[in-house]
Amino acid sequence: MTTISPIELNRWRADDKAHQLIDVREDYEVEICSMGGLHIPMNEIMERMSEISKDIPVVVHCKSGRRSEAVVAHLMRYGYQNAFSLDGGIIAWIETVEPALEKY
């Protein structure tokens, strides 16, 4: 499993490194807090794969990292070589990078 830490993702953002952020949480979770990026609920990944880039790294996140790990494993089976799961999900992001976001 390929993961990326919140600190490393924050570095990518600060350096303007090209990447696509995919949020696989449910609608009600995104309403609570968001890191930005493209929202594709986990249950819609199959029918919306055309929206996910194969040309740049893709970082997938959820609340804790479990759903995003499953999505990354799925993407890798379909040829996505640069797919990463955000280690610890948005909770870890809040704890280490952006504590102003609402933790739930």
Image: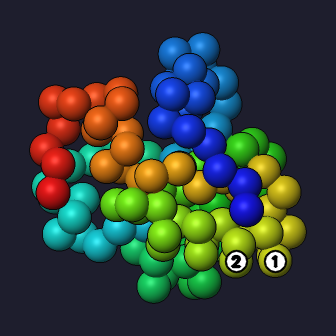
Residue 96 placement (x, y as % from top left): 36, 30
Q: Is 39 or 101 nearer to us in this picture?
A: 101
Q: Is any part of residue 38 visible from this angle?
A: no
Helix, strand or loop for disc 1: helix
Helix, strand or loop for disc 2: helix
Q: Is 83 or 64 nearer to us in this picture?
A: 64
- Per the image, the residue denoted by label 2 is 74
Looking at the image, residue 73 sits to the left or right of residue 47; the answer is: right
Q: Which residue is pictured at 48% across the width and 36% down the height?
A: 6
Q: Is any part of residue 19 visible from this angle?
A: yes
Q: Are marks 2 and 1 in contact (CB under 8 Å)?
A: yes
Q: Amino acid at mark 2?
A: His
Looking at the image, residue 80 sits to the left or right of residue 4; the answer is: right
Q: Which residue is pictured at 51% across the width and 28% down the height?
A: 7
Looking at the image, residue 86 sits to the left or right of residue 33; the answer is: right
Q: How is the image coloured?
A: rainbow
- Vertical position of residue 30 compared to residue 12: above or below: below
Q: Amino acid at mark 1?
A: Arg
Q: Which residue is pictured at 48% across the width and 72% down the height?
A: 67
Identity of the residue furthest to the top in this view = 15
Looking at the image, residue 42 sits to the left or right of residue 103; the answer is: right
**Circle on res. 77:** 1
